[in-house]
Image: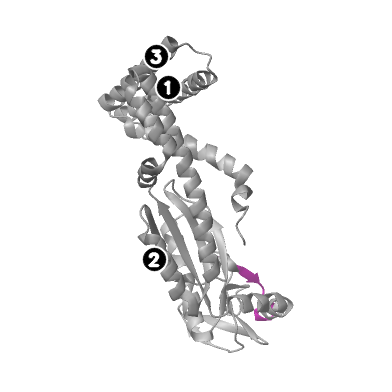
Amino acid sequence: MAINIDEENLKHGLLGLVIAIVEIIKDTLRHQAMERIESGRLAEEEIERLGSAFEELDKAIEDMKREQGISEAVHSVRKGLDDVASDIVNKLVDFEKWKGVKR
Amino acid sequence: MSKKSGRYVYCVADSGKSVNFGRIGIDKGIVYTIPSGNLCAVVHNCSKPYQSKDAEKVKGWVRTHQNIVDVAGKELGTVIPLSFDVMVKGSNKDVMNWLEKENEKLMDIIKRIKGRQEFGVQIFLDRKIMGSKIAEKNKEIQRLRKEMEKESKGKAYFLRQRIERVVKREIERGADLCFKDFFNRIKIVADDVRVDKVKSSDMLMNLSCLVHKGRIGELGTELGIIDDMEGFSVRFTGPWPPYSFV
């Protein structure tokens, strides 16, 4: 089967994928940071610095998505990954939902 | 006609009648019944299965198949719909043997679906609406919001993240409770409910319901109540032949 490659499409797709991965890494880092904050291991000024850094990173990513018109592409990569993950999780825990449901 | 080596089966009906429906079948096949005792199979003669790479062609065949199940249901009463492209190898005698051999099983199915129809029920949840309703009421969120107002930029960032996390957790908890509540309400009205996979992230539940003809109004009322709830919407389709329950 032939694949139609349009340069603009390719750029959007690739950039979308890269930014989606950056977002996922950022989310993981933020998760880590929040765990440390909640465990009380960080000093006040460390929390402040981290928070400001994340705030700026969020803004930079949002700006880039808007400028490049790739919000939709990023969303669809992340949705695709989410669907795969929730499929796997559902297969493992679906019966939990049925506890308390009279069939 | 009888030289063809197979019988394409549309459905099995709760009737021993011999009926000729004429050339209304797939590829203009002559559709007729093969009775055996108290049951009959609705068939046409064919020699090979229906397979094609042309999706439109297949869709047309499936539509014809569904149409014939409908026509047979109107003429013969309760029918067990078979899925598209089921064939019995051999002659009318082989179909009769099959009906005879499976009689008990088929009669059980007929008993279960008699006087009933299948409906599709899809319930959608607008998580944004649910989220803002939760945020209005939830004490933890209100406390975090107040705290956030007082904090400097960096710390406020993490408080905002915590609020989002709480909202998300509460939405999922609420969605789960609604799922169980709606399921139980529908289960009371329906004879049988099958849970199908949801097809999009805003779909809370996707059900196939087997409902007695006399209780369709009740199901409609229940779904109307759910549809009127803020943040929820219901898609109700049917009636279909009970494909999901045979």
Secondary structure under tag 1 reads: helix
Side (left or right) of B5 relative to B117: right
Asked where in the image residue B48 lies, by quadrant, the reply is bottom right
Of labels 2 and 1, the one closer to you: 2
Q: Is residue B14 above or below residue B81?
A: below
User: Considering the image in quadrants, where does the N terminus of chain A appear?
Assistant: top left
Q: Is residue B96 above or below residue A14?
A: below
Side (left or right) of B207 relative to B15: left
Give the chain of mark 1. A
Judge whether residue B87 can be spotted in this image.
yes
Q: Which mark is residue B224?
A: 2
Residue B115 position, x and y percent, is 54, 80
Asked where in the image residue B114 lies, by quadrant, the reply is bottom right
Residue B65 position, x and y percent, is 49, 70
Residue A79 position, x and y percent, is 44, 37
User: Considering the image in quadrants, where does the C terminus of chain A appear?
Assistant: bottom right
Queried whether the magenta region covers residue B86, the answer comes back as yes
Q: Which residue is mark 1?
A: A22
Q: Which mark is residue A48?
A: 3
Residue at x-position 39% and y-position 66%: B224
Residue at x-position 42% and y-position 65%: B223
Name the amino acid type tagged 2: Gly
Name the amino acid type tagged 3: Glu
Residue sticking out furthest to the bottom: B17
Residue B243 position, x and y percent, is 54, 67
Q: Which mark is residue A13?
A: none
Judge whether residue A1 can be spotted in this image.
no
Residue sticking out furthest to the left: A67
